[in-house]
Amino acid sequence: MNFHFTSQLEESLFNLTDFNCASSQQLLKKDNLYKIIWAKDNDVLIVVDGYKIELKHNQIIFCTPLNILEIALGQRGIMSFVFNREFYCIRDHDKEVSCNGFLFFGSSQSPIVSLNEKEQEGYKMLYYFFREEFEINDHIQGEMLRVLLKRLLIKSTRLIRKNIPEPNLANDKMDVIRHFNILVEKYFREKHSVSDYAEMLNKSPKTLSNLFKKYSEKTALTFINERILLEAKRLLMFSDKTSTEIAYELGYKEPAHFSKFFKNQLGTSPIEYKKTRLQKV
């Protein structure tokens, strides 16, 4: 199944798909696509950035254009919402849905939410609205699909917020967290310390660290390190760059410092990591 909407004038694209046809499989190879993948009917297995992830029935994962995905043809039970920046810009519409820094670019790992029985009904209803809209081909179809996507993003952002240690954290404090995440995504190649980001947020490092204790079991520094590490692993696995070239790209003046960081995080050197991962492919 692959319902699709495109606008040549806007160069926008939106697909509702189960990735079980050749045309939808091509979406996995395209750049600049956001992908929301829902294990709608049963458990499913996907590969994100070279790692296998088993999505349990009624779990949803949110993947950015940076994520490299593999979904086997013929796998049943998947429902996905795929769109590009031209169809719905996460950054430009941030004030409307507040998902940037939570659903997308909120950490090094693609966030996963689990739907309870009541939430499942809400998402199924949205799915049927999407299906219904694809049956109507008129000049406002794209706008209607955007409205539905916006509702999906808002519902999902609320679910993410419910799962943090202090779900009633004030909105202004949540905005600090979101902006921290967005800044990390933008500057992780050159800024590696909590104090760097605290300064940009006009906060003290201690204030930022204390805020993270209410938001996550991970520290602010862990978020920074994991983002650097994710990029390092992607470059090792999916590029021809050497460990030295990757070190410089990630802001390390000395390749040895990068190798030490990598080994401290994963217990193995960049070269050994790449060798081991390639043997598993």
Image (cartoon, rainbow, N blue to C red):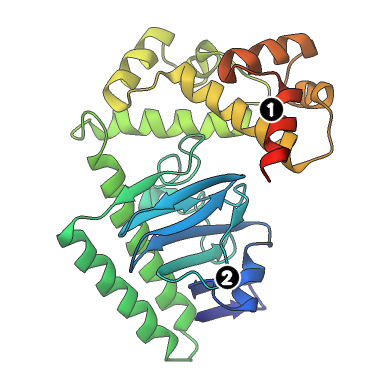
Q: Decide: few, some or many residues near mark 2? Use Cα within 10 Å; few <14, some 14-19, many ≥20.
A: few
Find disc 1 in the rendering and name its residue: 273
Local SS, label 2: loop
Report how far apart the C-alphas of labels 2 and 1 lie in the structure.
29 Å
Q: Nearer the viewer, residue 263 or 149?
A: 263
From the viewer's perspective, is residue 215 above or below residue 31? above
Residue 116: give x, y in percent of width and height: 19, 55
* Residue farthest to the front, as pictured: 279
Name the residue type under label 2.
Leu
Residue 262 quadrant: top right
Compared across the picture, whether 223 is left or right of 127 comes to right
Residue 87 quadrant: bottom right
Find disc 2 in the rendering and name its residue: 73
Compared across the picture, whether 64 is left or right of 36 comes to right
Q: Residue at x 73, y 24 (%)?
A: 272
Number of marks present in the image shown? 2
Residue 136: give x, y in percent of width and height: 43, 91
Name the residue type under label 1.
Tyr
